[in-house]
Amino acid sequence: MLDRIEQIESEARAAIEAATGTAELEELRVLYLGRKAELTGILRGIADLPGEERGEVGAAANRARKELEALLSTRAEALDAAELQARLVEDRVDVTLPGAPARPPGHLHLITRTTRQIEDVMIGLGYRVMEGPEIEHDYYNFTALNHPEGHPARMLQDTFYVQSHPELLLRTHTSPVQVRAMETQPPPIFMIAPGKVYRRDSDATHSPMFHQVEGLAVGEGITLADLKGTLREMLRAIFGGERETRMRPHFFPFTEPSVEFDVSCFQCEGTGKLGDGERCNLCKGIGWIEIGGAGMVDPNLFGFVESNGYDAERVQGFAFGMGVERIAMLRHGVPDLRRFFDNDVRVLEQFS
Amino acid sequence: MRVPYSWLREYCDPGIGPEELAERLAMTGTEVERVITVGPPSAESFVVGKVLAAEPHPDADRLRVCTVDTGDGERTIVCGAPNVAAGQTVPVALPGATMPGGQKLGKAKLRGVESEGMILSATELEVGEDSAGILVLDDGAVPGQALAEVLPVAEPVLELEVTPNRVDCFGVYGVAREVHAITAAPLGPEPWAEDAPAEGEGDVGDYASVEVEAPDLCPRFTARVFTDVTIGPSPAWLQARLTAAGQRPINNVVDITNYTMLLTAQPLHAFDLDRVPGGELTIRAAGEGEKMTTLDGVERTFDAETVLVCDRNGPSGIAGIMGGQVSEVSDETTRVLLEVANWNGTNILRTSRLLSLRSEASSRFEKQLHPDLCLRAQRIASRLMIELCGAKLVPGTIDVAADLPKPHRIVLRSSRVEGLLGMPIERADQAAYLERLGFGVDADGDDLVVEVPADRHNDVTREVDLIEEVARVHGLDGHLPSTLPSSAGQVGGLTREQRLRRRAEDAMRDLGFDEIVGWSFTDPGEAGRLRILEGDPRAEGIVVANPLSEDQSVMRATLLGSLLDVAARNLARDADAVALFESGRVYLSSDGAGEGPLSGHFPGERPAPFAEPHRLGCLAVGPLLAKSWRGGGEPADFFALKAVLEAIAARLGAEPAFEPASEPFLHPGRSAQVLVGGAPAGWVGEVHPLVCRAWDLDAAVAFEVGLAALVGAASVGEETFEDVTAFPAVYQDLAVVVPSEVAATEVRAAILAGGGELLRAAEVFDLYEGEQLDEGRKSLALRLEFRAADRTLTDEEVAGPRGSIEAELEKVGGSLRV
């Protein structure tokens, strides 16, 4: 019996060593260590052996079994690794073929992007974003903005009116939201209002539809100097940290004093001259670029919202407005206003 | 407003160049559009000459060979002007001079005779309109004298962009006062300070009478009468000033009215008194349809709000806008009635718009002048009439005036100046600035009591207006600090709606769509091209009363038109596929539902006139995934865009549902209504082939949903914790056979209804239609997920509801497939 065990072991050992694949190895495991294997039979039959043989045969059979199990597992690991290696070689692809297409990301319109940029700067300064209708009552677009009936400024901007509704119009500026906002919220109020506006004008520098952002800050002790500082922070955030801001007195019916505001030219650093001594084409040699209009809210406006806490002797503040397209054109070198509404994908895809 | 620099300097010489003055004006509120030079670019080599002899040219009939004393000796100059004659004092350009337009003058041989210069006409110098002959100067000029000492040669002209509140700066003296205020350079006396001597016969009442029937529209009407008027050309200096200011010289009387207007901002009108029967003038409203031929030769028809200056026979002029031919001053005129009136600005503006007739006069009157200006203009014009036309002023002035406004007296508090501006300005400086601007100033403790001059009566009415005056003269650039509001503010931020709108837009971008910004207006034919029928509210778009063109005359009621327009335009430009979206408003005459700006409800006491809901629209033409060596490239279809919409909704935490339904512009079998929270929120589908054809597209697929509905159902940011069970789910696949027309959602709903509370989800994962099934039936495979929070489910529990599932399926005509 002992000889037989030794014989099985050496026979199995040889077969395992010679095995060339994990599948063959599995067959060998069944053959030599499976339920029907001879060695398994011997181990199972130990109890039937005479007492003096039991110990010796049992020990030998168990040892052989353990040896073979160990050998199988070592051998399996080796074959496994070899097979994996072979498979990896076989799985090789031509890495120079194009990648499987994923949908590339699209693009936000430059107007959206620029509007958001302005919104985010002003949010950081403590402002909220409010919206108003684009088809508006002339009350909000004109009357409550200090353009009484027949006021010349009412005719300054040619206005689209709604058919059969002479008192309704397409708002000519985002300023109507100032009054709507003050009707809704008592002071202090810090808000901006972005949106579409409309004027009867169409050429390279005028579009019948364009976008503005309005700003309004009203509370106690808000000054013209605060307006200047606010505009400076905003324009620095948009045009770069070293930019300067200046205000020139101007006239608007709904602010007093009124100003136009400029940012120092970011192409020539405000010198008006380019590196080669040529006149700067962006600011036309002036060193400043006009951005928008602003001023201290005219006390007459507070008269329209007095019942909501706007007492002109107690509260004051500023308002400003500017064109979104103009800022986008300056920042990104867009040459023509009409490009914004042409929506050529070759242009859209330049800005994400 | 064009201001010739030499004219300005007659009243206030700032001692700086025109460019520097332009900069100072711009920084104090008067924008200077540009500074131009009228006449030659430089006055160099332009001198006064005396014609000593003018002989015929030997070889040319029309040329003369002149001998001209130019101070440095005698020169031969060939001249073609018919009026050149010995003894004349004339302007001469010497060789080396640069003519207007840049041409440089040299010596030239004219028909064999060398000419050492050029005798000039008024047109060549740009000092007048007469090009028929040379300009003859007054004898006072000395040969060899620089021409610039006699005439404004190379005149710098400031083109001011005067804001509508500053009517005073529509006159040169008003601009001079402004220059005085901002530079402190001395201001000359008011040119109207001295009146003319009245040496005519009788009294003005003997010659003329005026009746004002519309005093509210004509607050003041003044008239003077001149006799012995000699009509002729104006002197060179006057012609030069008018030309530089952009006015054409006509004759001395008309030029005087224009000159006076340019100086004072107050327009005047001269009548030939002999063409006003009886000298009677009546100011009245026109009769509806009344007609008159204006000075420009056009017959014009009036409405009842037009104000006319009439004689006994009918209209003689449109008040404040333009005179009529009937009483026009002509070469034969010897007696002139000079009208200087004040009109209601709003009415003038209205009438000039209505007639599309704008004049220098109307552009001033429409800004509302002060009645005090009338007599100023009468005084200046009277002196010039006597001086330049040899006229005699008849004593007396007809002056029909309603109550003249009293000047405003306003208290200016020092504390208020600093409080509003955020910078202190010394009280003495405040007073000095205001006085230089022509205000009367008295001190009252810390405050100033300020009287507003007539020129600024309508513009400066309140303390804040005075603060503006003080601030702008003081300067905002250097002095004003940059600060931020210190008052307690609020927390800035976007509303949840605004944040989620951004999120939806970002999601669209991340899914590969390009954002467009479409026109809010469209053409009236769009609804028809979209097959929207009459009666559908979207066919009844809001109409613009005065569009720029028919193409932009209706407000859009859907984003689809904009998307199709942009897609078609890009495909025509050789794009082979587009994936577009727009986040924007549509405009509906029906009242929109919902709350907040996304639904078209905005802050303010008066609601928006129309609904302006914010929509998210999307359109794809061609494949969303490019064709590659591995496949793909199939054009986007219904399911592709449905998946996009579901992905967007998922980004917001909303769950849209889809029901078979169609829109007129969609493929009837491949479109669905989108429901959010059970309510209709939009549509998704393949665009109807006829609509595609109208836009010249092969195929397109699109959706449009109300952002308010999606955002309203969004759970993002509002999620509540739900414990995850430790017990595994049990999955079971079911195959269901139903009639082909039964929607997948109905099958799913039936299964969920019959599955009991342990059934958590059922999703369709396969669809089969074909041979192994009866005609008209389809097989759907669904994966069911059963789960309990407190135990592992047994096979029996999962199999339990099978009977009730079968019962529910039977209701929709379905059965389990075995």
Image (cartoon, helix red, strand yellow):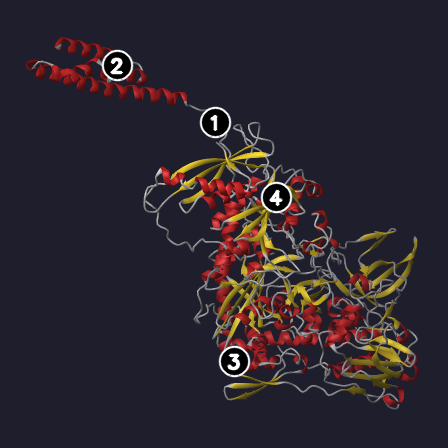
Closer to the camera in the image, B95 or B740? B740
Q: CA distance from mark 4 to mark 3?
A: 61 Å
Q: Are marks 4 and 3 in contact (CB under 8 Å)?
A: no
> Is residue B146 something that shows in the picture?
no
Mark 2 to mark 3 CA distance (whole Å) = 105 Å
Disc ID at residue B671: 4
Residue at 47%, 27% in the rendered image: A96
- For label 4, the SS is strand
> Label 3 marks which chain's residue?
A
Gap in angstroms between the C-alphas marked 2 and 4: 65 Å
* Residue at the left extreme of this rendering: A52
- Near-viewer residue (B431 or B353): B353
The answer to whether residue B585 is left or right of residue A122 is right
**Mark 4 belongs to which amino acid?**
Ser
**Residue carrying label 3:** A313
At mark 3, the secondary structure is loop
In front of the other: B621 or B148 = B621
Where residue B310 sits: x, y (%)? 87, 79
Q: Which residue is mark 2?
A: A31
Hey, which quadrant is residue A10 in on the image?
top left
What is the spatial separation of the Cα atoms under label 1 and label 2, in whole angstroms?
A: 48 Å
Q: How many C-alpha atoms fall within 10 Å of the one at disc 1: few (<14), some, or many (≥20)? A: few
Q: Are marks 2 and 4 on the same chain?
A: no
